[in-house]
């Protein structure tokens, strides 16, 4: 064979390779049902993590492949299954901030074996792991020859004999020779792998060059319970905003959270106009407000969640907010669900973008007021690895506040995350459709032994202008995910339901 080889090349997998990849997998895994990935799954893998998907081509023909994702391995225990690690085969478990490269698949077609092409794939994975500063590589290794010994050897005994080279197993022998060390037998790992007896060996390779990142575990939140009052102009309103930012940053807070429509007092100047026109005039201030918040985030060394403001895009009115990071970068979020009153009086439209944001203090999500009352949104953010959910809100009555408050606390429990809510108090008699404000800003936690028994970390005084400072420990969330009294994320019945973005 070697005399006919003109070119061997390792390349990133592309969707154009799909048909050849499918044919190869059907051939390589001929003894297994559902032996190949569907095209949308491969496309999802490439879109999420193109560096992790590579192929070996010999004379332009696909000879082998290696598929990988990054995971935060602390969110899984050592009894996980292939279905668990792949998020029910959706790869929703891929985490750009993960600490481990997890091997999803690797193979070399039969006619190309003996050329040490598999070693090239593993060398690439090791180089990628070092480049990304990951702790190492982990995957569940098949035991394809175990079916020959099931009547007389336990999986553990079989593994020991393979390690001592008393039994030859093509997969395990190859992995061990490539510096992977077996750490555990996994039962029921890959459904349908009858040759392995549905067992697998958890194999690990440690990156000796790994340097632990200094991302904060304990994060300090600064919530601003904003008093609605009249201001002469934008300058005066931003002076008040800076006063609060100065206050929470003096306590070395990592985040400052403002309420929904905190800048509504500026509509007083336009109160002679219909409400739908007045709020569009307010929207004209939004670009300057964002610019000033971004400068304040840098100068006070704090990440600012700007609550929300009206914004006009293509002549449509939206309720949006911005995450102004202390490194100078800016992210945008939208209110997806508008209330009947907001649609009727102001003509607000619901947004369409839902995403998490990476920060120097973990991954966060933001849901504006009414959005917190739709549990699907929080769950989608949780599946992206959200640690803290921020909810800026604006409610005029106690029953309206209670809806936000109780739904926000439910989000903390069901999604195993922290939730911070901040609202406005007082009244605006010279601004139509604003009336009296009711709020009690709070920080919620899951309800388990490492957290407050009632799930409330901190709470402001009702209807009083003030700041609320609270520390949250992100490491406790990882412990909860693995060892909690109940495990809401892990115990979901994804075999009978799932939530996906459109």
Image: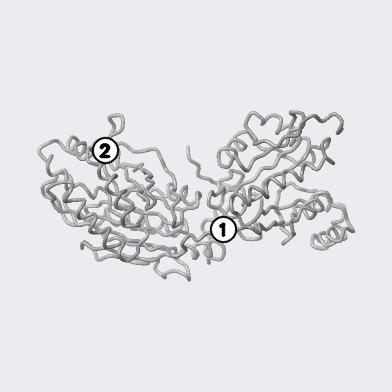
Where residue 83 sits in the image (x, y, percent)? 64, 49
Q: What element does badge 1 sit on?
A: helix
Where residue 23 sits in the image (x, y, percent)? 74, 31
CA–CA distance in space, label 1 to label 2: 40 Å
- Which of labels 1 and 2 is toward the front? 1
Residue sitting at x 80%, y 59%:
155
Q: Nearer the viewer, residue 274 or 282?
A: 282
The dot on residue 75 is 1
Residue sitting at x 16%, y 43%:
267
Q: Is residue 205 left or right of residue 286?
A: right
Question: Quadrant location of residue 360?
Answer: bottom left
Q: Identify the residue position indicated by label 2 in the image.
A: 343
Q: Is residue 287 visible?
A: yes
Q: Is residue 197 visible?
A: no
Q: Nearer the viewer, residue 172 or 133?
A: 133
Residue sitting at x 34%, y 66%:
458
């Amino acid at each position: 064979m070697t005399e006919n080889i003109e070119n061997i090349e390792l390349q990133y997998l592309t969707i154009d390779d799909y048909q050849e990849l499918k044919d190869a997998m059907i051939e390589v895994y001929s003894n297994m049902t559902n032996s190949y990935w569907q095209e949308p799954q491969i496309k999802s893998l490439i879109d999420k993590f193109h560096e992790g998907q590579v192929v070996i081509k010999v004379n332009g023909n696909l000879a082998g492949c290696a598929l990988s994702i990054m995971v935060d391995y602390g969110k899984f225990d050592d009894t996980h299954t292939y279905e668990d690690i792949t998020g029910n085969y959706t790869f929703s478990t891929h985490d750009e901030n993960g600490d481990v490269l997890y091997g999803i698949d690797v193979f070399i077609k039969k006619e190309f074996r003996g050329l040490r092409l598999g070693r090239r794939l593993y060398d690439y994975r090791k180089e990628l792991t070092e480049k990304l500063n990951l702790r190492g590589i982990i995957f569940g290794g098949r035991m394809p020859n175990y079916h020959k010994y099931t009547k007389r050897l336990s999986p553990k005994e079989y593994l020991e004999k393979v390690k001592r080279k008393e039994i030859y197993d093509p997969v395990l022998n190859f992995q061990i020779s490539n510096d992977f060390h077996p750490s555990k037998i996994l039962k029921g790992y890959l459904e349908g792998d009858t040759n392995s007896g549905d067992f697998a060996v958890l194999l690990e390779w440690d990156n000796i060059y790994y340097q632990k990142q200094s991302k904060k575990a304990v994060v300090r939140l600064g919530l601003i319970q904003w008093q609605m009052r009249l201001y002469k102009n934008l300058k005066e309103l931003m002076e008040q905003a800076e006063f609060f930012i100065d206050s929470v940053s003096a306590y070395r807070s990592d985040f400052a959270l403002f309420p929904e429509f905190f800048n509504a007092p500026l509509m007083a100047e336009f109160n002679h106009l219909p409400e739908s026109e007045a709020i569009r005039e307010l929207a004209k201030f939004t670009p300057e407000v964002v610019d000033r918040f971004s400068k304040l985030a840098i100068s006070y060394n704090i990440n600012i969640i700007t609550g929300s403001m009206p914004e006009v895009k293509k002549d449509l009115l939206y309720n949006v907010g911005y995450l102004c990071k202390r490194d100078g970068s800016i992210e945008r979020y939208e209110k997806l669900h508008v209330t009947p009153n907001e649609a009727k009086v102001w003509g607000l439209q619901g947004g369409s973008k839902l995403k998490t944001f990476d920060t120097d203090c973990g991954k966060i999500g933001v849901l504006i007021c009414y959005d917190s009352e739709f549990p699907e949104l929080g769950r989608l953010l949780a599946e992206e690895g959200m640690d803290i959910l921020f909810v800026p809100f604006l409610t005029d009555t106690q029953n309206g506040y209670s809806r936000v408050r109780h739904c926000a606390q439910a989000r903390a429990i069901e999604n195993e995350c922290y939730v911070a809510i901040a609202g406005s108090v007082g009244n605006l008699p010279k601004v139509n459709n604003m009336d009296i404000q009711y709020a009690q800003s709070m920080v919620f936690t899951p309800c388990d032994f490492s957290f407050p028994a009632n799930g409330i970390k901190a709470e402001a005084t009702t209807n009083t202008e003030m700041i609320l400072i609270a520390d949250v420990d992100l490491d406790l969330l990882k412990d909860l995910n693995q060892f909690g009294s109940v495990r809401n994320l892990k115990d979901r019945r994804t075999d009978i339901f799932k939530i996906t973005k459109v």
